[in-house]
Amino acid sequence: MILLLKNANYIDWQTLSFTKTHLLIEDGKEGKIHFLDAPEKFPAEVEVLDANGGFVTKAFAVGHHHAYSALSRGMPAPRHTPHNFYEILKYIWWTLDKALDKDMVKASALATAMACAKAGSTFVIDHHASPNFIEGSLEIMAKAFEKVGVSHLLCYEITDRDGPDKARQGLEETAAWLENHQGLIGLHASFTVGDETMKKAVGLMEKYQSGFHIHVAEDPYDENDSLEKYGKRVVERLHDFGALDTEKTILGHCLHVDENERALIKNGKAWVVQNTESNLNNNVGFFRSEGLGERIMLGTDGMHSDMLRSAQAACFAGQPFDDIDFPEAYRRFRNVHNYLSKNHFQGDGENNLVVLDYDSPTEMNTDNFLGHFLFGLRASHVKHVISDGEVIVKDRKLQKVNEEEVLAFTREQGKRLWSRL
């Protein structure tokens, strides 16, 4: 059904121009939006939503998420206290992901999709891991996202850390998914992916014309391992395998890459995704964009699902370390749309919109929007969300799922998960 969004203060996400208008919004993955000077000029069969003068702009998107971590909030402390990055993975995240089963994966994806939608994101690029429930895990996640109304670009984390059989299952799940869906080839990180598995992943990348989604130099451990095993740094290794030759490849973090690696990234085609708060939480260092080029976008790394918060953190934490100002923070925040568009991934069209109920004590306009973006706007200002032309959040309430019922399910699964840790 066509949607009429009346009385909107429309903000063009690229030019930041402001227009008082009414929007006629087509549904579907390829749906368009049309500007009307009067709300009466529309077909009879439309759904009407009044923005009541609220600010309307393109919905947000998450450049790197880990939905599998959604049930970790408030979980028990690990049995062993981690003292470095590798131990954080071993005692926390690799313990958690091994405990996940079908219902927990479903609950994690539902919880993540709901949180993303309520924070204004209608598209999520996710990097999934559940070593003891691999086959069919991406289908479970996809159905959960779609039930809420959120589009997705999924991958399964292929790794050798649990042995060759699990690596094989990860490769098979990836191939099965890419046969009929858009997606990426997920790899954990260089230090848990040997050459044989990497070669097989490259084969999938070439067969399905896709790209890698991999963590890169999040900690010096990754670089040291690559130098010791292969005599080259992580990005050099990925370059030699051809992973930087496609615009679909996403390199997560890239904190400890050296100048040559930065040049390889800049001169290649891969994209970098920055995850500031996760880096702060893991105490692994600060992102520095110098020498990486323009293909940088933002993610949450599973810390939360609020992209406004991610952009603000990137800007504020980056002041002493990074060449980032207000326009650059916003550019990275929106760059995920360019990544999706350049690679022809569906689900992030112009009919994905967010309506902000932002009652600022000062005027917001084209000239000062970035000041409001960084110092004023919050996820709590998201009032309505439109995904592929369909209203999925109205008056801050999810429209396609019963949130109370879903949260009862996620809490039940959370308790089951914690009992296994």
Image: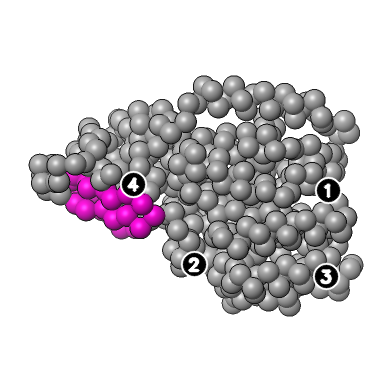
Q: Which residue is mark 3?
A: 195
Question: Quadrant of the rendered structure where residue 296 is?
Answer: bottom right
> What label sits on residue 86 in the rendered view?
1
Front one among 326 and 147: 147
Q: Secondary structure at mark 4?
A: loop
Name the spot of residue 160 as percent of width and height, x first.
83, 58
Q: Position of residue 311 (x, y in %)?
A: 50, 47
Apparent side of residue 159 relative to residue 293 in the rendered image (left or right): right
Residue type at the position of mark 1: Tyr
Q: Is residue 354 magenta?
A: no
Which of the 4 image quarters holds residue 216?
Answer: bottom right
Residue that carries the numbered disc 2 in the rendered image: 343
Query: Quarter-wise, where is residue 378 in the image?
Result: top left
Residue nearest the viewer, comparing 218 with 198: 198
Q: CA distance from mark 3 to mark 2?
A: 27 Å
Whether the magenta-drawn stretch holds residue 22 is answered as yes
Q: Residue at 48% x, 61% y: name it.
A: 345
In depth, the one of 270 and 283 nearer the eye is 270
Amino acid carrying label 4: it is Gly
Residue interval drawn in magenta: 14-35
CA separation in Å, label 2 and label 1: 33 Å
The answer to the question of whether label 1 and label 4 lie on touching residues, with beta carbons closer than 8 A, is no
Tell me, yes or no, whether the two marked residues, 3 and 2, touch with CB atoms within 8 Å.
no
First in sequence: mark 2 vs mark 4: 2
Towards the viewer: 365 or 339: 339
Amino acid carrying label 3: it is: Asp
Nearer to us of marks 2 and 1 is 2
